[in-house]
Image (cartoon, grey):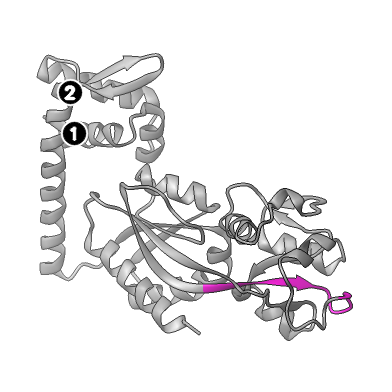
């Protein structure tokens, strides 16, 4: 039996989708289906039930998956053991990050990691928090770093670092000289919001709810899909907004924006997200440990 067919089976069983498995494996869907059918022919039984465009593991499929988990883990252990003997540090790791983190935190982190491990290729996928969590759950990426809370019992969620969000306004805005701004005052001005699924938006919504308000009460002329777009809109006088302090260093230094703390402050945590059961390679561990150290040293 080919280990490639076992790998294809393991991927399909993990996401319960031939289409998603094909994307992860960089194969066509018919090729994935063909590999599964060959494996089922070897065992002379179905490994998946296919009903109403959904698939699930049969009892035989669950048994094969149990062995596949151990076989693939051992196969990975073998590769890692040989690499440690030969001193080989090459390879590929895939990192996913929500937009704010990718734009303002990861460049330094990845630059430092690349200097330490020049032969390792790091592939970065940028999306909002919900999408990054989905990619970790689907095994599309090895490690996610997100700015919103994660509710998935099958994933490991660990603190990265604390972050503060602040109200931003142009320097000539009526409230630019205020020392703080209350949640209620946010309702008095046009508010430029992030899109649904954004970690920043979720944090702001929870902040408002904690003070008896709802995001629908904000005067929202439009929504934008990135922090850079929001900062540009605020600079142009289209409204106020709330963004991470890490995104404001340049604009505050140049006097293009003023940030105002809320009272009470809007605080959140950046999180690492990983699979609980996924086999971890030496390179994945190195990236995770490096990212942990970077976050610890970056705490203000």
Residue 263 disc label: none
Q: Residues within 10 Å of mark 1 (few under 14, many from 20)?
A: many
Q: Residue at the location (34% across, 35% down)?
A: 15
Q: In the image, is residue 76 above or below residue 271?
A: above
Separation (CA) of disc 1 from disc 2: 8 Å
Q: Residue extending furthest front?
A: 212
On the picture, is 262 further left or further right than 97?
right
Q: Residue at x 48, y 74 (%)?
A: 162
Percent position (x, y) of residue 161?
45, 73
For the residue pair 166 and 292, the one nearer the viewer reads as 166
**Do the CB atoms of the residues marked 1 and 2 lie less than 8 Å apart?**
yes
Which residue is more in the foreground, 214 or 166? 214
Magenta span: 163-174
Residue at the disc numbered 1: 6
- In which quadrant of the rendered view does residue 88 lie? bottom left
Residue that carries the numbered disc 2 in the rendered image? 39
Q: Secondary structure at mark 1?
A: helix
Q: Position of residue 102 (x, y in %)?
A: 53, 64
| Mark 2 crowd level (few <14, some 14–19, many ≥20, 10 Å Cα) | many
Q: Position of residue 230 (x, y in %)?
A: 74, 61
Residue 90 visible from this viewpoint? no
Task: Name the foreground residue: 126 vs 235.
Answer: 235
- What residue is drawn where x is 19% and y is 16%? 46
Asked if the magenta segment contains residue 250, the reply would be no
Residue at 36%, 22% in the rendered image: 30
User: Quadrant where the N terminus lies?
Assistant: top left
């Amino acid at each position: 039996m080919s280990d490639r067919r076992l790998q294809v089976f393991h991927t399909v069983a993990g996401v319960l989708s031939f289409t998603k498995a094909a994307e992860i494996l960089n194969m066509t869907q018919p090729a994935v289906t063909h590999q599964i059918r060959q494996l089922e022919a070897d065992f002379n039984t179905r490994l998946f039930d296919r009903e109403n465009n959904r698939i699930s593991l049969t009892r035989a499929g669950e048994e094969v998956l149990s062995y596949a988990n151990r076989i693939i883990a051992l196969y990975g252990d073998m590769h890692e053991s040989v690499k440690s003997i030969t001193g080989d540090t090459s390879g590929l790791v895939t990192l996913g990050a929500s937009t704010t983190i990718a734009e303002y935190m990861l460049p330094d982190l990845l630059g430092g990691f690349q200097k330490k491990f020049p032969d390792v290729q790091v592939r970065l996928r940028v999306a909002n928090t919900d999408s990054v969590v989905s990619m970790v759950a689907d095994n599309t990426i090895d490690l996610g770093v997100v700015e919103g809370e994660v509710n998935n019992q099958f994933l490991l969620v660990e603190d990265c670092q604390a972050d503060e969000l602040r109200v931003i306004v142009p320097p000539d805005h009526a409230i630019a000289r205020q020392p703080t701004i209350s949640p209620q005052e946010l309702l008095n001005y046009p508010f430029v919001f992030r899109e649904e699924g954004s970690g920043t938006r979720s944090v702001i919504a929870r902040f408002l709810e904690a003070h008896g308000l709802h995001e629908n009460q904000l005067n929202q002329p439009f929504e934008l899909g990135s922090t850079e777009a929001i900062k540009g809109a605020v600079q142009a006088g289209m409204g106020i907004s709330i963004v991470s302090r890490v995104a404001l260093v340049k604009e505050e230094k140049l006097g293009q924006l003023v940030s105002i703390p809320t009272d009470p402050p809007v605080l959140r945590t950046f999180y690492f997200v990983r699979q609980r059961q996924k086999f971890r390679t030496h390179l994945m561990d190195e990236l995770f440990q490096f990212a942990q150290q970077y976050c610890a040293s970056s705490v203000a």
